[in-house]
Image (cartoon, coloured by chain):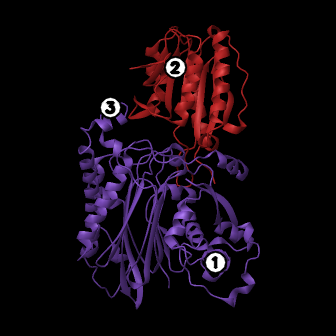
Chain colours: A purple, B red
Amino acid sequence: MAFSTEKFNSTCPLWTWKPISPGKDQHSESACQSETLSHGFEIIGARVRGKKHKHEGTNCDDWFEIARSGDWNIIAVSDGAGSKMFSRVGARVACQTAVNYLVKQLQKHHIKPRQEWTADTFARNEIYQFKEPDIELTQKILHEAIQSAYYAIEEAFHARDQLKYYYKALGNRDLTLSDFSTTLLLAIHTRVHYKAAPYSLVLTCQIGDGMTAAICQQQSISCLLGKVEKNHFGGETQFLTSSKRQLERNYLATITYSFFSQMRALMVMTDGVSDDYFPPDKNMLRLFGDLILNGIIPISTFSSRFKEKEILRQNDYLFIQERLSEKGSQPTPICSVSEYAKIINIPIEKLIATPAWLVAGIPKEILESHDISSENRLLAWLDTYNIRGSFDDRTLVVLTKEF
Amino acid sequence: MFIRRLPVYLLLDCSASMTGQPIEQVRQGLRALLDDLSTEPMAIETVYLSVITFNSTAQQLIPLTELMQFKEPKIQASGATALGAALRLLKDCLDKEVRKSTEDQKGDWKPLVFLMTDGMPTDSWEMAADEIKELKMANLIAFAAGSGTDVANLKRITNIVLKSDELSPGALKAFFQWMSQSILRTGKSVQVMAQSAPVDLPPPPPQIQIVP
């Protein structure tokens, strides 16, 4: 089934922007943040209210939090259930609580230095506990963060369940915990000095859809740190609030991923982004390429060495799409790394593994626009929808390091 | 790359008792549904529609088709009420046409099925009904158009049953209008228990009641 650009463009004028209707638990329409971390790592994050919510005048249901604590960088991303009126509260509370917990517990937590890091270092027993105590303690802390997020949502529910406002808003029925349904994705990262090089150690755990992926330093390898849900219909994801059995450590250990490598980027996102890059095993690399080409992930410029690769047909991979805001529709340029790869006739994996060729494709306006921060560029990119059927809230946090 | 589609199936009783005003209302209702949906960008981008009619037999008049490519079918009324055949055909269509999520494939949204009938089934339908209910293959909403049909039968197929005892002139058309609101899920909603999870639906129009 071919995706028809024509039909997609024809719906553009039909999408409207309405302000968020007044009521309790208002969240900002969008948010973006950046931090310069130690050892050359940087992190940016943004979330936007999706086209559907703009059209309906409802809140953004996504949330994210970024923090640093001791040796650790902490990322939390969440997506409230679209069919649940107050899921955004669950999403926000889950992220904030999980991150606060991780900040406290990881502040003085260190991974011990090792002469050798091998697959064996990450060996697990039959109930998925790591054999190495410091790594197992890290996993334990991550799981406790998820548990605390769940209990915080319960508290948020109890704080509201006697209030008439919610009863009426729901069409005269009582609030239930499921009205706060949300996914939750956690990723924690620390730098490990090994073989005189900066390695990254990452642990992730997610309940529900969305994805976390790491890009290795060679830029040609992506590693999924989450699982694609199968045998469901779209939108039928698991939620943090779905069942308390999910909170059991034995279960959480089976969905906790570890990663150890010289890492170029770590991307954590809600399904508003991952759905546009599906299936993830083949497309996370393409997402990384798009983020570089659109000036969101910094990349050092190599100058004249690759003049023969300079692109004169920029219009063929730079598309003007509409970005909807209260001011109306703003035409916004979006570059596509897959189209660029086609034009220069290089397989996309090879293109992304060759930074100089990627740089050669970044439009001059982006290279020279130093007044726009990376996180604002990320916000604009997330806010400019360019795929048919994609109108969900979008959130993406990217942790990067240039080598 | 595939998109997530919202598959919508209409199962329409076209038996002899629908002759005249009722079937004309179905035709008008379907036209109005198409008009309503065609102005909504979300529907244009994701809704795929199929029409299954049943009388003495069941037939899929229009296979699952993109909204903007959908051409209104010719609907006539005559014959018996083969509800069983319709349900078996529906299951077949759901199996063949709807995509589930896999590692390589984005699944469609859970299909919406609207079943409208005005009379008692004339074939064996109970097993098909039980199967559809148990497999949870769709969010199925049944409408008892008039008092000629047994609401209890419909409850066997789905927990979401609406009725209009007095099938007044506007009732069928109103049902179609309500259908487009359900598809678009706009406005305030009432929650109805459906299988394991409640489904948010818009409040029905005055001529139609939700069967508790």
Q: Nearer the viewer, mark 3 or mark 2?
A: 3
Determine the residue positioned at 31% across, 46% down. Answer: A243
Chain label for disc 2:
B
Determine the residue positioned at 39% across, 48% down. Answer: A238
Q: Which class describes the residues within 10 Å of circle 2: few (<14), some (14-19), or many (20+)?
A: many
As drawn, A48 above or below A57 = below
Looking at the rendered structure, the secondary structure element under dot 2 is strand
Contact check, label 3 and label 1, Cβ < 8 Å? no
Does B56 sit left or right of B212 as displayed?
right
Contact check, label 3 and label 2, Cβ < 8 Å? no
Q: Which class describes the residues within 10 Å of circle 1: few (<14), some (14-19), or many (20+)?
A: many
Q: CA distance from mark 2 to mark 1?
A: 57 Å
Which residue is tagged 1?
A358
Q: Residue furthest bottom?
A: A196
- For the residue pair B185 and B115, the one nearer the viewer reads as B185
Which residue is tagged 3?
A173
Looking at the rendered structure, the secondary structure element under dot 3 is loop
Q: Nearer the viewer, mark 3 or mark 1?
A: 3
Which residue is tagged 2?
B143
Q: CA distance from mark 3 to mark 2?
A: 24 Å
Q: Is residue B19 visible?
A: no
Looking at the rendered structure, the secondary structure element under dot 1 is helix
> What is the three-letter code of the residue carrying label 3?
Arg
> What is the three-letter code of the residue carrying label 1?
Leu
Chain label for disc 1:
A
Q: Determine if marks 3 and 1 fall on one subunit.
A: yes
Q: Determine if marks 2 and 1 fall on one subunit.
A: no
